[in-house]
Image (tube, helix red, strand yellow):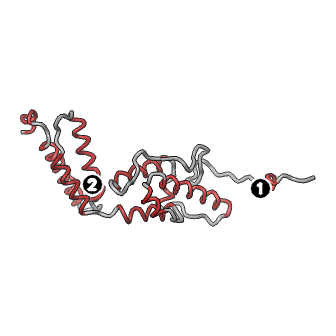
Amino acid sequence: MATSNNSMVPNKTIDSSNPIYLHPYDHPGMIPVSNFFDGTSFGAWKRAMMIALSAKNKLCIINNNVTMPVNETHLAFWQRCNDMVISWILNTLTHDIRNSVLYAETAQILWNDLTSHYGQSNGAKIYQLQKNFCQITQGSCDIATYFAQMKSNWDELNAINTIPSCTCGVAHSFAKRDEDQMLIQFLVGLNPSYGVIIS
């Protein structure tokens, strides 16, 4: 009596808490973030992708905390997971950028390639963000909308200009200085009707 090929395959499962586990609803066509990366605002796109991958328990795939296993059983699971993360990242890139990283063998290599090309501290980007601070004013916006515009610029600038950690307390002084600068920039852009509060 002939046996089914399926009966010859051992039951290979992986625990759902394992980072290389793929949920049945995970598929290569998923777009994990709403903003596509077109070569600008890398910091915002990177942050959104990291949040999405963390929510899927896949952040460790791009930061090399889960390396390619030598166990043949788990290797197939890892390869599928790696390919899935690659497809999710590719789905959020514009055509030209996607083509430039399409042949990366692992999600970590793809991620590092994007970071090295677009994540560098960029003088032109810092200039543009500083220029934005001078141009953003409250105008007809309410306070919350105006604050959101300013905060978006602050966050992007902070992502580019990170303060190295230290034990001497200097980083805290720099952070305090930056907070004071942000407050002043915010107050400068408020409508004249807030003059009394500003003073």
Residue 12: where, in percent of width, then height?
70, 54
Could you tell me which residue is drawn at 60 percent across and 56 percent down?
Answer: 80
Image quadrant where residue 97 sits: bottom left
Q: What amino acid type is highlighted by mark number 2?
A: Asn
- On the rendered structure, is 77 left or right of 63? right
Q: Is residue 39 above or below residue 141?
A: below
Who's the residue at 47% across and 50% down the image?
Answer: 53
Residue 131 image offset from top left, x and y in percent: 18, 53
Q: Residue furthest right?
A: 1
The residue most toward the front is: 95
- Give above or below for 74 relative to 135: below
- In the picture of the structure, the residue carrying the numbered disc 1 is 9
Compared to 170, does 182 lie above or below? above
Mark 2 sits on what residue?
158
**On screen, 126 above or below 182?**
below
Residue type (three-letter) at the residue carrying disc 1: Val
Q: Residues within 10 Å of mark 1 (few under 14, many from 20)?
A: few
Picture coordinates of residue 126, whole percent (x, y): 23, 58
Q: Quadrant of the C terminus?
A: top left
